[in-house]
Image (cartoon, helix red, strand yellow):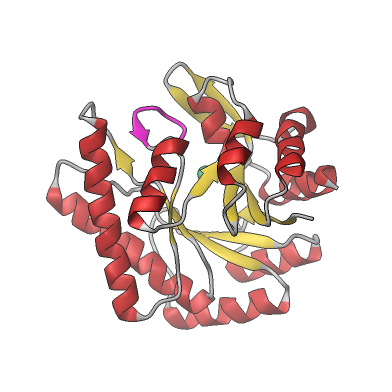
Amino acid sequence: MTKIYFGNAGSGGLGNEKGIKHAGELGLDAMEVAFTYGVRMSNSMAKKIKKTAEKNNIRLSVHAPYYINLASKDRSKITASKKRILKSCERAHYMDASPVVFHAGFYQSRNHEDIYNMIKKQILDIKKKIRSKGWKVKLAPETTGKPSQFAGLDELLRLKRSAGCSICIDFAHLYARSQGNIDYNEIMKKLKHLSHIHCHFSGITYTTKGERSHKLMEKDFFMPLAKAIKKAKPKSMTIINESPDVFGDAVKMKKWFG
Ligand SMILES: [Zn+2]
């Protein structure tokens, strides 16, 4: 039996501690702490959050700030991006949260292979710093919702092998990236060997350029993925709900999965 940890992205405005308690009360299993616009948390607060999560049986992960581009044309922006990721990793270590999820960068109409190599180099460098600090945390670049943005699933799986990082699979993003031509069975085949699969899901609107916005989850939209998961039987997964109703839709997905 696949163990699935269903949870909410961010605290829905409650703050992390109340958000964790609320997730626990709702019978959820996970929460992704969102450093959306910056890491505004002390290490001592992070330790407090760790205890609250343990008490409520909530598995924590972290989403690093949105503004990250490890392939920027501007070197100072790469440096600032790495700082944001490392700050997220330090807090994640004290919260006992993993992985640290981030959107790695943009192609800006450059050669995809060059961007892949730039991002790989930065991830290896960040991993070196994490090791030297002794933080127990994994890095997880995420599948993005726009073809102009690094990266799709196959590219991320390649990065995982060559840089030894984790990955975050955002199924809603993959849906938008493929204009709705998604084959969940194919995707699960590529992922089921992983010891743990960290995912995001929600409803999604998109244009020919890819993702536009996250929307509420519907049963008809969730069930094809649920069926593919049951068929593939991976060991364990986390599914973080990123819809506008962060708690409600996580509860619904857990119920629908059965
Ligand atoms: Zn996501």
Q: Main secondary structure of the magenta part?
A: loop
Residue 180 coordinates in the image, percent (x, y): 58, 21
Establish if 30 lies above or below 198: below
The part of the image, by quadrant, that contains residue 57 is: bottom right
Residue occupying the point 20% across, 38% down: 114
Residue occupying the point 59% across, 30% down: 204
Residue 93 coordinates in the image, percent (x, y): 46, 75
Establish if 72 lies above or below 79: above
Q: Is residue 83 left or right of residue 134?
A: left
Q: Residue furthest top?
A: 208
Establish if 121 lies above or below 189: below
What range of the chain is rendered magenta? 144-150
Q: Is residue 83 visible?
A: no
Q: How many marks are shown on the rendered structure? A: 0
Q: Is residue 2 visible?
A: yes
Residue occupying the point 28% across, 51% down: 120
Residue 147 coordinates in the image, percent (x, y): 39, 27
Q: Is residue 209 left or right of residue 111?
A: right
The part of the image, by quadrant, that contains residue 91 is: bottom left
Q: Nearer the viewer, residue 231 or 28?
A: 231
Q: Nearer the viewer, residue 157 or 106?
A: 157
In magenta stretch: residue 9 = no
Q: Quadrant of the N terminus?
A: bottom right
Q: Nearer the viewer, residue 104 or 163?
A: 163
Residue 115 coordinates in the image, percent (x, y): 24, 39
Residue occupying the point 67% across, 78% down: 54
